[in-house]
Image: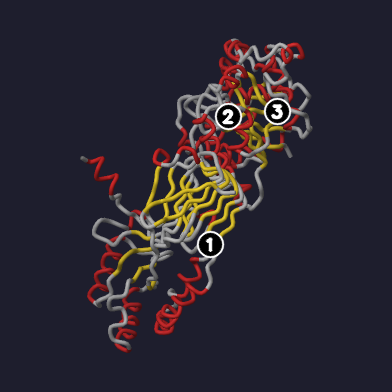
């Protein structure tokens, strides 16, 4: 029974990034809240229905103060979706979840920081920042960035690049994973996991010199090693999405 | 300034301690001043393999915690003037290793020795990361089988990200030491072949140590294999590996592939 269900319609899990306003409170908090009120009085409903992240990095407050701050913001209709830069001990079940840029592959960090900074302007320029947020969207779609990695991706490493294509000159080891918003090109053996088009890009493809993958996925549709055509193992292969089916074909 | 070498693998039981002792003894026989440091706090073995277990008074943890001087903890080998051992503690646990303490000890050893060989514990936790932290050169010990190769791959990733060299943007020099290699079983397909391992790990090979009873015999009598039986096949392989560590470019013989001329004529008997 279970088998039949999992085979016909697998659950689709996709990575997606959203743009959020990041609020950076300053000490003393009462003064900062007063300034925030002042800003809100000038532009009513500024924070209404916007996703807001609280950035408390370097802020010297304890757990009860943080809870108080979140409550105070809640009273002003600022709903906090996550807290960034907080120590684990500061957070609890009654507080919004921790947000750390979510990308385990710190080694291969790329571009995201710029966008975050735009939304992170001091509160006096918050209206200007809001304008920047709005213009940031067309900016992001203007050029498709790409990431080129010139060394092998080792077991246990995770390469996360939601912005676009990833090219790896080297192999992806068993137990390693590559997650890209666009296509994935591997000039070497793919022995780990490759997930392309995770931000909803069904036209993304996966290319590799030697297919020995543990798992491949495009736009949330995946196949494990056992489900792949065995005659393509060890070959140069490209993988693409045809409707809701993953297709694979030999290259060259 | 001496070179700091970490002998690491991720997986346990692949031959880190045996290799640390054998390479240390091989380098010391050339007259280099060598210290082998056991980082496996709580599960020390290096003292046994080097035959110094009855001479341990102070250990690495004592030195780090200021309970003993470095010179009190160092044990000179009875057979080789220039070979020293810094044992690990058997009664404490790895939490007693502090980054600052390790840094101090390594710096002191580096100024007094030509080679500081750090025998890393298995795993990727504190002991292993501290052992690799200050290294100039890493020797990745791998057996020709899939789980060992994957763990080594993981360790190489850590060497490239979690060491001081990596954090300073430099490249860590890495060598692969393939141990317990059995040419007959590799030929049969029971073991990974040398090329397969090299293809997966893509770091330079510094030696292939054949699977041999000599290794076990040597550790049972408490002697590095390069001291116990200098003519044995594993000892010769370790001597060559030590020369490559010093920068010599020697061609590598893959055991089993230098089959005799007659063997070639009369076909593949081993297969």
Q: Which residue is mark 1?
A: A110
Query: Which residue occupies 29% across, 65% down?
Result: A65
Q: Which residue is mark 2?
A: B142
Same chain for mark 2 and mark 3? The answer is yes
Q: Chain of mark 2?
A: B
Total labels drawn: 3
Residue B160, numbered circle: none
Tell me, yes or no, if residue A23 can be seen here: no
- Circles 2 and 3, Cβ within 8 Å, touching? The answer is no
Query: Which residue occupies 46% across, 55% down?
Result: A196
Label 2: how many Cα within 10 Å (few below 14, some 14–19, many 20+): many
Q: Chain of mark 1?
A: A
Query: Which residue occupies 28% across, 86% down?
Result: A44
Quadrant position of the N terminus of chain B in the picture: top right
The Cα–Cα distance between marks 1 and 3, rounded to whole angstroms, is 43 Å
Which of A136/B34 is in front?
A136
Which badge, 2 or 3, is on the more N-terminal residue? 3
Q: Which residue is mark 3?
A: B34
Label 1: how many Cα within 10 Å (few below 14, some 14–19, many 20+): some
Tell me the element at label 3.
strand
């Amino acid at each position: 029974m279970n088998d039949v269900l999992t085979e016909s319609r697998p659950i689709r899990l996709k990575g997606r990034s959203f743009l959020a306003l990041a609020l950076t409170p300053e000490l003393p908090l009462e003064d900062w809240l007063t300034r925030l009120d002042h800003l809100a009085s000038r532009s009513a409903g500024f924070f209404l229905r916007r996703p807001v992240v609280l950035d408390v990095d370097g802020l010297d407050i304890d757990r009860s103060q943080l809870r108080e701050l979140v409550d105070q913001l809640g009273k002003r209709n600022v709903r906090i979706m996550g807290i960034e830069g907080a120590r684990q001990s500061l957070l609890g079940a009654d507080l919004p979840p921790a947000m750390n840029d979510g990308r385990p592959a710190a080694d291969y960090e790329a571009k995201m920081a710029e966008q975050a900074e735009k939304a992170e302007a001091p509160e006096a320029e918050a209206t200007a920042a809001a304008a920047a947020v709005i213009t940031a969207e067309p900016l992001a779609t203007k050029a498709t960035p790409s990431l080129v990695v010139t060394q092998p991706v080792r077991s246990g490493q995770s390469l996360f690049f939601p912005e676009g294509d990833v090219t790896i000159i080297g192999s992806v080891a068993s137990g390693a994973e590559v997650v890209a918003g666009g296509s994935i090109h591997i000039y070497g053996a793919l022995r780990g996991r490759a997930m392309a088009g995770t931000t909803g890009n069904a036209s993304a493809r996966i290319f590799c010199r030697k297919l020995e993958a543990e798992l491949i996925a495009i736009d949330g549709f995946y196949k494990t090693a056992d489900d792949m055509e065995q005659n393509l193992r060890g070959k140069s292969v490209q993988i693409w999405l045809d409707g809701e089916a993953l297709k694979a074909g030999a290259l060259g | 300034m001496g070179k700091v070498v970490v002998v690491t693998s991720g997986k346990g039981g692949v031959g880190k301690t045996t290799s640390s002792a054998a390479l240390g003894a091989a380098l010391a026989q050339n007259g280099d001043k060598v210290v082998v440091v056991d980082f496996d706090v709580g599960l020390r073995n290096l003292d046994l393999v080097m035959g110094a277990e009855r001479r341990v008074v102070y250990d690495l943890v004592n030195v780090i915690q200021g309970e003993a001087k470095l010179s009190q903890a160092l044990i000179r080998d009875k057979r080789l003037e220039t070979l020293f051992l810094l044992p690990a503690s058997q009664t404490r646990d790895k939490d007693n290793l502090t980054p600052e303490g390790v840094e101090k000890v390594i710096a002191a050893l580096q100024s007094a020795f030509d080679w500081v060989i750090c025998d890393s514990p298995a795993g990727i936790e504190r002991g292993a990361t501290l052992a690799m932290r200050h290294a100039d050169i890493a020797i990745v010990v791998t057996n020709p089988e899939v789980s060992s190769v994957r763990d080594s791959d993981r360790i190489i990733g850590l060497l490239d990200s979690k060491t001081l060299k990596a954090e300073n943007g430099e490249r860590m020099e890495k060598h692969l030491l393939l141990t317990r290699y059995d040419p007959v079983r590799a030929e049969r397909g029971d073991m990974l072949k040398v090329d397969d391992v090299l293809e997966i790990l893509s770091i330079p090979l510094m030696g292939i140590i054949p699977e041999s009873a000599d290794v076990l015999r040597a550790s049972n009598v408490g002697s590095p294999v390069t001291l116990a039986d200098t003519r044995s096949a594993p000892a010769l392989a370790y001597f060559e590996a030590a020369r490559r560590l010093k920068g010599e470019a020697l061609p590598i013989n893959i055991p089993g592939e230098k089959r005799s001329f007659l063997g070639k004529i009369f076909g593949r008997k081993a297969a």
